[in-house]
Amino acid sequence: MRLVAIVLVTGLSGHVLASMSETPGEKPAEELPRAVQRRFELWQKPEGAQLQARYRMTRVSSLLYEPRVVQGGLSFAGDRLELRDDELDGATTTIVGGALTIAANDARLPGRPAPDSAAGRWLQARLLALFAAQDGEALRRDTRVRVLRGGVLELTPTAGHPARRVVRELRVALHPGTGEVVELVLVEASGDVVTLVLSEHRR
């Protein structure tokens, strides 16, 4: 799945932060550690903020002899997220609203919409919410959120959601000093793991 492989004004308040770590129907979670709250406060950006960054994407799969590594540039503006591989034989993955397109970097080859799926839609929504960096509730929708050691977020489709057939979990690491997303780890139900490491963030 090349969504990540392939192809994520005021600070978040305490009650929103606590609600993000709950599962509906459970008792309210205890207040999150201050260090974790601080990362969420830094994560949230003014409306309309844009982002450019470099990425290194690694896919580990039992179907590959060795990990597949790709580097490229990420850009986000409005509701548009683009990941463009550096290599000519790579691809450009674009998410605009609810539409996903994967186009070969070689202009001689045509672009095409990616197949629609529940897992793809779930992952697209999480990515757009992560890089828009405004609405914690958008991350939590149809999602179970846990905070792991080191302040890493674990996002999992809710029980019964069809995306669970493909997505086991999406782990998100935020920079402790800026709140920017610095690493995404997608663990698929097949056992494949896709890691996206971001650097050189520019807002």
Image: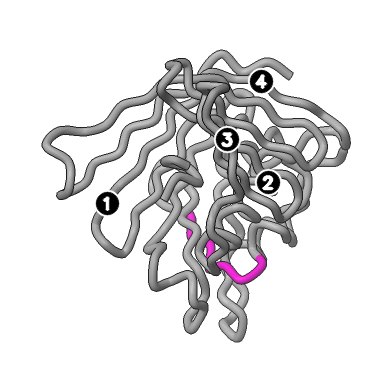
| Label 2 Cα neighbours within 10 Å, binned few <14 / some 14-19 / many ≥20 | many
What label sits on residue 128 in the rendered view?
Answer: 2
Q: x, y (%) of residue 108?
A: 54, 24
What label sits on residue 110 in the rendered view?
Answer: 3
Label 4 – label 2 distance at C-alpha: 14 Å
Q: x, y (%) of residue 135?
A: 77, 51
152 displayed left or right of 25: left
Residue 46's place in the image compared with 52, above or below, is below
Residue assigned mark 1:
192
Q: Amino acid at mark 4?
A: Gln
Give the residue at the far front of this rendering: 108
Label 1 – label 2 distance at C-alpha: 22 Å
Residue assigned mark 4:
52
Q: Amino acid at mark 1?
A: Asp
Q: Nearer the viewer, mark 1 or mark 3?
A: 3
Label 4 – label 1 distance at C-alpha: 27 Å
Q: Residue at x 71, y 55 (%)?
A: 98
Residue range highlighted in magenta: 141-147
Q: Residue at x 47, y 16 (%)?
A: 86
Mark 1 vs mark 2: which is more N-terminal?
2
| Label 3 Cα neighbours within 10 Å, binned few <14 / some 14-19 / many ≥20 | few
157 and 1: which is toward the camera: 1
Q: Amino acid at mark 3?
A: Pro
Q: x, y (%) of residue 85?
A: 48, 23
- For numbered disc 3, what is the local secondary structure? loop
